[in-house]
Amino acid sequence: MGSLTNPRPSRSQRRLSPTFLTHDSLVSKRSPAELSHEELITSFSSLWDKVEMDYALLERDALRKERESLRAGRDEMLQTNDRLLGQLLEIQRQAQIMEAGLEGICTTEGLGELVRGSGGT
């Protein structure tokens, strides 16, 4: 594991070796070749537990980021919806003003003037 001059494994070697991921100090001081079948299974099981835990943390982080992204998208949609609703209300207000103006023109007297002005009877 370590170099010939330094038998102690480096930090990255300890991190990568399943024997150094177990909680049993006796197992962690021996190379994988020196371990019994049960110790190897325990070491692998410990490594697998760590992988599952890391995966769960990554999955949780990915879900959190996705929720944040969805919230941001939702907030943006709500702002757009509010803006469009405001524009629609303004269009309705202007339509009511135009409708009231047309009603004034379309009275019997107003309609007669409109027809005479356009060259009608």
Image: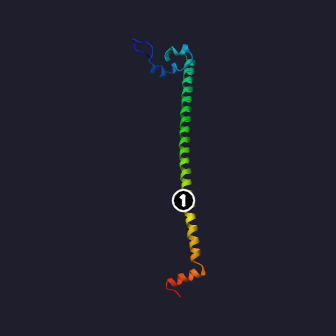
Q: Is residue 36 above or below residue 87?
A: above
Residue at left 53%, top 21%?
A: 21
Q: Which residue is mark 1?
A: 87
**Label 1 Cα crowd, 10 Å radius (few <14 / some 14-19 / many 20+):** few
Residue 74: x and y, percent? Answer: 56, 47
Residue at left 51%, top 19%?
A: 20
Residue 84: x and y, percent? Answer: 54, 57
Residue at left 56%, top 83%?
A: 112
Which of these two is toward me, 95 or 58?
95
Q: Is residue 24 above or below residue 114?
A: above
Residue 36: x and y, percent? Answer: 55, 16
Residue at left 40%, top 15%?
A: 3
Q: Looking at this rendering, what residue extends furthest in the left direction? A: 5
Examine the image and state in which quarter residue 6 appears: top left
Q: Quadrant of the N terminus?
A: top left
Examine the image and state in which quarter residue 13 appears: top left
Amino acid tagged 1: Gln
Residue 89: x and y, percent? Answer: 57, 60
| Label 1 SS | helix
